[in-house]
Amino acid sequence: MTSELLHDQQKPRTYSFDARPHEPAGAKPAKRLSPARIMIYSLLFVATLYYLLPLYVMVMTSLKGLPEIRLGNIFSPPMKLTFAPWVKAWDGACTGLYCEGLKVGFWNSIKITVPSTIVSIAVASVNGYALTNWKFKGSEVFFAILIFGSFIPYQVMLFPLVIITRELGIFGSLSGIVFIHTIFGMPILTLLFRNYFMSLPPELFKAARVDGAGFWRIFLVILVPMSLPIFAVALILQVTGIWNDFLFGLVFAGLKNFPMTVQLNNIVNATQGVKEYNVNMAAALLTGLVPLSIYFISGKLFVRGIAAGAVKG
Amino acid sequence: MNSIEIKDLSLRFGEVEVLKNLNLSIHKGEFLVLLGSSGCGKSTLLNCVAGLLDLSHGQIFIDERNVTWEEPKDRGIGMVFQSYALYPQMSVRGNLSFGLKNAGIPKAEIAKRIQRAAEILQIQDLLHRKPAALSGGQRQRVAIGRALVRDVDVFLFDEPLSNLDAKLRADLRVEINRLHHRLKNTMIYVTHDQIEAMTLADRIAVMRDGNILQLDVPSQIYNRPINKYIAGFIGSPSMNFLEGKLSAGDNPSFIFGDERFDMSRYRFDGEGQQNGATTLGVRPEHIRTGNAAQEMPISRNIVVEVVEPMGSDTLVRTHLAGQEFRLRMDGLASVNKGDNLLVGFDPAQVSLFETTSEQRL
């Protein structure tokens, strides 16, 4: 009886504490959605829809048969699901004279992208390193000229480069197109690497010199292992850039080595016969698949690397 | 024999002359501290000795060998940096062995040297760790170890303790001191911290604007600074400066305001006394109070204006004949704002500077 009484007496006290729930104490409560937030999210949602809609239409069209496409309902999902357009795009679509599909172009693009990426990154990283740590007389001017190169529209240089590659005997060959991609990757990649190496403490380089390491040993043993993020950025930049390239592939690669983008164009812009929209859509999606998957896999790494290059420390 | 000799060294970056015709001889086994505020060229000078910067003019000799055009690795130096500059991808052992591997030293010898350095610096348990897993003090030990394993005659320290907290700094300072006594190497140590300079140095070179102002043992730098800049730079709290004029003669005296201080006990330098505008410098810690002040040749009454108790001692701010004046009292002294206080000092302990040239008289 007494204990109950005591219990009752204590109760009001607890209530009085609870009666002031807005007294700040402990963990901060999560904020509820404010009207401004709702606005932002709905705007983002609409924007997302807007950008995803064409992709949706492409995927749907590529999975339909031609009779169904002729009905004109581009937003409706396929009534009869078919993968035949994908198979045809990969294996049998006609690009110009040959009807072997995109797979030839796919392997050509691989053959162009892999060496171009490796060579351009290798050269540009050494460039950036030398411009940062082994300054020579006029290195700043050299760098300025290099950066200026990235502002010139490259169509201007097309014809001189055709002559240069012809004189070098590499016009219309695989090494020719690799050479071209290496040159055009140089300004932006050098800038990227230079900025990154600039952000590393210069004492590290000095310590390595006192330790007797030379130009290559400092670069390969000390700097490269601590620069993997920026190499990832350069890799993404180059792979997507070179894969998506159309103009250089068309001009410099030669008939046998046309990359996927050129072949895609040949398929889509074919003027003979029926327009096979479903095959065209499938071919376009196939071509875009490589850069797309790279962004998906390494998006986070990409952002981190860009930020690491931009912000000191 | 001189371990390091710098002759007529100048360094120019474009139009800017960073080092101006420096001459410096450092004895074998000497601990020389380059002291100065930031931008005075002390680190630049060290980089020149290390071979990391090319000179515009002059020569550098290390162990009687002209190394002016030599690569850093061929100069027989080891260097420790403020930011540690450890190779982040390598373990401590990798950091220590990197230079030795580059020099093509056999594995057994490398292991032996690492063992020895690790023992001296007490980092045996850390050898397998990466620098990121070390504390600041441990990192700096490893950085010192990297210089140690090179087995060289000359160590160069570029503000090695500036990135550490106060307690650790004091500990490592003692350790560097011990290391120097044990190894007996020549060491050049760059710092802006006067306590490090005073405690570690055999000799201190005070630098300013690319010149060496004074090169002397710490007690001389402290007691007989050759100009007003050094006098104000060394010592904390810094020296009091009273502007006045000197009247020369058999009983020279310093006159300022209505005051007249008898300077006959002052030891004049070089050209001796001369009439004219003069600055009198007296260190706050050389000022006595109370009974002790009465025994001093010069004593005056002042009114306490600000009291700053710092634990070990108490800083008192006041004015003497209209000029700002600080003095340091024992931490136990009870003194309050508004108190009347008798202060005194000995002219033998002060410094007199010619006001315009700021040179010591």
Image: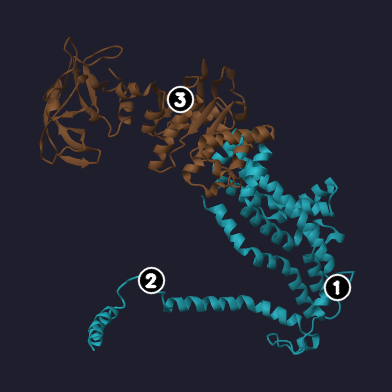
Chain colours: A cyan, B brown
**Number of marks present in the image shown:** 3
Amino acid type, mark 1: Asp
Which circle, 1 or 2, is nearer the viewer? Answer: 2
- Residue B268: in sight, yes or no? yes
- For disc 3, the marked residue is B31
Judging from the image, mark 1 belongs to the subunit labelled A
Indicate the quadrant containing the C terminus of chain B: top left, top right, bottom left or bottom right. Answer: top left
Q: Which element type, helix, strand or loop, lies under badge 1?
A: helix
Residues at marks 1 and 2 touching, judged by CB atoms closer than 8 Å = no
Name of the residue lying farthest toward the front: A1
Q: In the drawing, does residue A74 fall left or right of residue B281?
A: right
- For disc 2, the marked residue is A28
Q: Could you tell me residue B322's position as x and y percent?
A: 15, 32
| Quadrant assignment, res B286 | top left
- For disc 1, the marked residue is A91
Q: In the drawing, does residue B18 fall left or right of residue A186?
A: left
Judging from the image, mark 3 belongs to the subunit labelled B
Amino acid type, mark 2: Lys
Q: Could you tell me residue B343's position as x and y percent?
A: 14, 29
Q: Could you tell me residue B181's position as x and y percent?
A: 46, 26
Q: Which element type, helix, strand or loop, lies under badge 2?
A: loop
Q: For marks 3 and 1, give the CA distance.
A: 78 Å
Residue at point 72%, 79% (across, down): A59
Q: In the drawing, does residue B94 fall left or right of residue A65?
A: left
Q: For marks 1 and 2, give the CA distance.
A: 60 Å
Q: Could you tell me residue B162's position as x and y percent?
A: 43, 39
Judging from the image, mark 2 belongs to the subunit labelled A
